Amino acid sequence: MRERLSFYVKRESFLHHLNPLTKLTLAFGLVFAAFLSPWYWTPSFFVLFAIIPLSFIGKVQREYFGAALRLILPAAGFLFLMQSFFQPIGVKVIFKFWFLDITQESLMFAFTNASRIFVMVSSFTLFLLTTHPSELMSDLTRRGLPSQFAYVIISTIQIIPQMQAKAQTIIAAQRSRGLDTQGSFFNRIGALVPLVGPLVFGSLVEVEERAIAIEARGFTSTSIKTSLREIPDTRFDKMFRWFLILLVIAVIAARIWLS
Amino acid sequence: MAIVNLQNVTYKYPLTHTPVLSNINLEVKEGEFVAVIGPNGAGKSTLCYTLAGFVPHFFKGELEGKVEVAGVDLKSTPLNEWVRNVGLAFQNPFNQISGAKYTVFEEIAFGLENQGVPRDEMNRRVDQALTMTGIRDLADRSPYSLSGGQQQRVALTSILVMQPKILVLDEPTSQMDPIGTREVFGVIRQMAERGMTVIMAEHKVEWIAEFADRVVALKDGKILLQGVPADVLTSHLLAENGFGTSRYTSAAREALKFNLWPKHLHLPTTLQEAVDGFNLTSAPSPKERGE
């Protein structure tokens, strides 16, 4: 069974040691600033001067570039092409292909949007690569997030691979009794029915047992919970968060000012 | 003074008419190790859930009679307070892993976090518990990467670390292979030796014979028989009522028909007793050996 269940890569770096909330604020801050900024070059500026340097600071550049080249760039590139062809704005045609016109405006619009998407996916990728899920949840729980909510998120991440394994077992069991899971589309859809029943009912039984298990360990205890992990929240973290909030406010102000 | 006290306990699950437990009277002294045996459907699990407070607080249904653990009454105590006194481990080790933690160490600390134990004390207690149950080498592994026997030992450790007054085990080895079974019973033996109060539902009578102080035989929700293992486990009543018996007892009972088991000896329940008994009948006397 795979031991690694999240994107998290364990390294020793400045970014890893930042408070999870600071990293979350950083990710959201970059996204908001990229989307709300009135200038088309802001997202690209973030990529060059924030996201790429941060991937090196967090020592996850290899993982980040892997994801960026294989996943984020193709998606953003596709978005760029679609929008530059099909966005019916602008009059300055610079390229003509069959019935499609590419105008300077549509090109700019597509570029801005694609780079915004690039910033959004990239900043959350960096966040996930450098933040352990249980650290994030412990920190958010300490700040008032209900522990039930945190539990649901963490346990779901961990239980998905187990559910997949169980679905495989059920499929194998049903096939050994002659269920046809191959062939046409409708055949395959039909084969889902005998899979869903055992999977859902089996899971309900499991949920009950798991509820008993965590209840037996005082999950609903009325005492104030403590945390095994010590998650530092330095003055730098607090100042940095304020800086990011101010940055977003400044971008909003610039947008209002220039419009 | 009994630490566990059940008086006339009768219980029906919601929407059912036949009681799963009827008129159970059971007292357990502090430090006693009580094994509960019985065929499937006898009410063993329900009895465990009752002791652990999940009947009636979690499963609802109708509970009559009195259940007291460490002087606290079950009906008037909310579940989240009750679990401080009573630890519960059950059959499926996989479902006892919280799913909220990424390493065994964190998994074991989960209960202490919920109780609000300070971090230093938490680290110390988890450390001690890992040593006690012999799973220190698993501390940094993911709970989901472990074998069934290892997961069950993690589950037991997670409960022990909370230092409950009594421990309730519901067939903790029923889904284990022989190696897993031995691992888990190794931990249980440790607890018995440390004088922990344990109530364990279990099918594997050979193991029960080794460490139980008392055996309670349950049939159709009623106590059929109880007493020291040597008496209960060799009783004819058990064989007649569909209970499993120790293979050593069965072997000696057969041997008795052919005069191969000494008549004055009690029927054996453990391997050692069987070896000793058969030695008496089969070992040639010094004269036979020509000395």
Image (cartoon, rainbow, N blue to C red):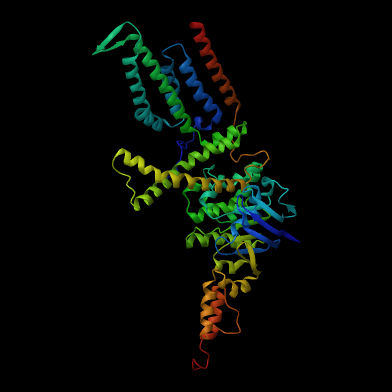
Taking the image as shown, residue B147 lies to the left or right of residue A211, namely: left
Q: Residue at x 57, y 54 (%)?
A: B90
Evaluate whether residue B141 shows in this view.
no
Q: Is residue B2 above or below residue A134?
A: below
Evaluate whether residue A93 shows in this view.
yes
Q: In the picture, which quadrant includes the N terminus of chain B?
A: bottom right
How many marks on residues? 0
Taking the image as shown, residue A14 lies to the left or right of residue B218, namely: left
Q: Nearer the viewer, residue B172 or A58?
A: B172
x%, y% of residue B58? 63, 47
x%, y% of residue B100? 54, 42
Q: Residue at x 54, y 65 (%)?
A: B204
Q: Nearer the viewer, residue B220 or B113?
A: B220
x%, y% of residue A202? 48, 48
Taking the image as shown, residue B11 lies to the left or right of residue A185, namely: right
x%, y% of residue B269? 57, 73
In the displayed orientation, state which residue is furthest to the front. B17
Q: Is residue B89 above or below residue B100?
A: below
Q: Is residue B42 above or below residue A112?
A: below
Taking the image as shown, residue B102 lies to the left or right of residue A226, namely: left
Q: Is residue B203 above or below residue B273?
A: above
Q: Nearer the viewer, residue A174 or A46?
A: A174
Q: Quadrant of residue A106?
A: top left
